[in-house]
Amino acid sequence: MKILLTGGAGFIATHTCVELCAAGHDVVIVDNYVNSNPEALRRVEEIVGHPVKAYEADVCDPEAMERIFAENQIDVVVHFAGLKAVGESVQIPLRYYRNNLDSTLTLCETMARHGCKRLVFSSSATVYGEPDEVPLREDMFCKGCTNPYGWTKYMIEKILQGVVNADPEWSVVLLRYFNPIGAHESGRIGEDPNGIPNNLMPYITKVAAGQLKRLTVFGNDYNTPDGTGVRDYIHVVDLANGHVKACDYAMDHVGCEIFNLGTGVGYSVLDLVNTFSRVNEIDLPYMIGPRRAGDVDACYADPKKAREVLGWEARKTLEDMCRDAWHWQKNNPKGYHD
Ligand code: WQD
């Protein structure tokens, strides 16, 4: 298959590109590098051992997208491109709605013009909102999101379901990620957030590297075993392999299907801190601070449907995630800017 990855230089997309190439697929990338670095693609080429065709372009740009589909016979698109910082989306909601929705609409219009009707979409567990119960199942009612970023993911799911309802030739796979962390075992690609990380694992690795003074644990009075927030951390390589299975599924089916990509196991903030310290033999200074607005007590997946329908399940452990995340940070103190 020839597969187009929008936002292909990003954290999850680069790991997905490596696994798609390993599975024998031909990958084409489009990325405007507003939130990523072309060096990441050079690292991917180093890992896969061959060039990967890449276009520097904005998915919102109809002319650029027309050229890509005119020059490449695309079988499946995996749509990663989008702004993704929860906190930032609260500050600049219009930019998030314009960018994330516009890019999706332009992409789908271009795909339809070229008869390419198979799309895997990078959605998020954030669409579930504040869950009444865990584990989360795909058939649960999504109560509403807590931030504009989450609303863009929710709206795009609805847009794509509408496309399938209007044209049953379309195949859409909605992948709801939980908390992707870790890095490729080579240590050559990994998570490279701009500025001070919002997410837990990249913050931990920068504390471990001495770039940040200490971790603040956002609250220890949640209704969880140790009082700190519980999440479903999934190794980014497991997540990438979920996309390989989703592309295969999209080729063989029509209609719209939703899949959770999580391990089904919830770990607390302190579980992650203690595992990271133990596995990497690094003391990690932290303090308990106030809760962060919008955080929920616990969020983890019921991964049954992906296991039974896609034939996929996460295999890597929390130890693997902590070891690989540190291996990337240790070898790339400034990420791709070294
Ligand atoms: C995890 C836990 C925090 C930082 C977000 C998005 C979600 C998805 C994944 C895109 C929570 C705690 C964190 C810190 C802390 N992104 N924490 N100190 O919020 O579960 O999910 O990223 O799809 O959409 O919402 O991930 O890593 O920010 O937080 O104590 O400095 O770590 O309170 O319990 P989150 P996170």
Image (tube, rainbow, N blue to C red):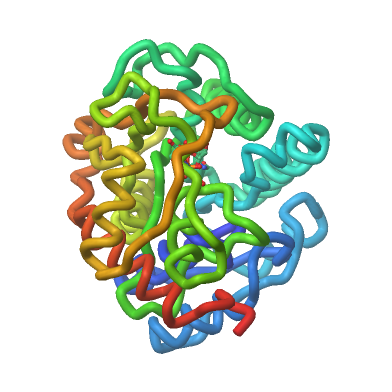
Quadrant assignment, res 151: top right
Q: Is residue 181 left or right of residue 129?
A: left
User: Quick one: 205 or 149, which is closer to the camera?
Assistant: 205
Q: Residue at x 45, y 45 (%)?
A: 287
User: Quick one: 281 or 51, which is closer to the camera?
Assistant: 281
Q: In the rendered image of this protein, does residue 5 appear above or below residue 296?
A: below
Q: In this view, does 112 lie to the left or right of 170?
A: right
User: Quick one: 66 or 217, which is closer to the camera?
Assistant: 217
Give coordinates of residue 324: x percent, y percent.
32, 68
Q: In the rendered image of this protein, does residue 69 appear above or below residue 289?
A: below
Give coordinates of residue 70: x percent, y percent.
69, 64
Q: Residue at x 64, y 76 (%)?
A: 38
Give coordinates of residue 239: x percent, y percent.
35, 52
The quarter of the rendered structure image containing the N terminus is: bottom left
Give coordinates of residue 266: x percent, y percent.
26, 35
| One can see residue 1 in this view | no
| One can see residue 218 in this view | yes
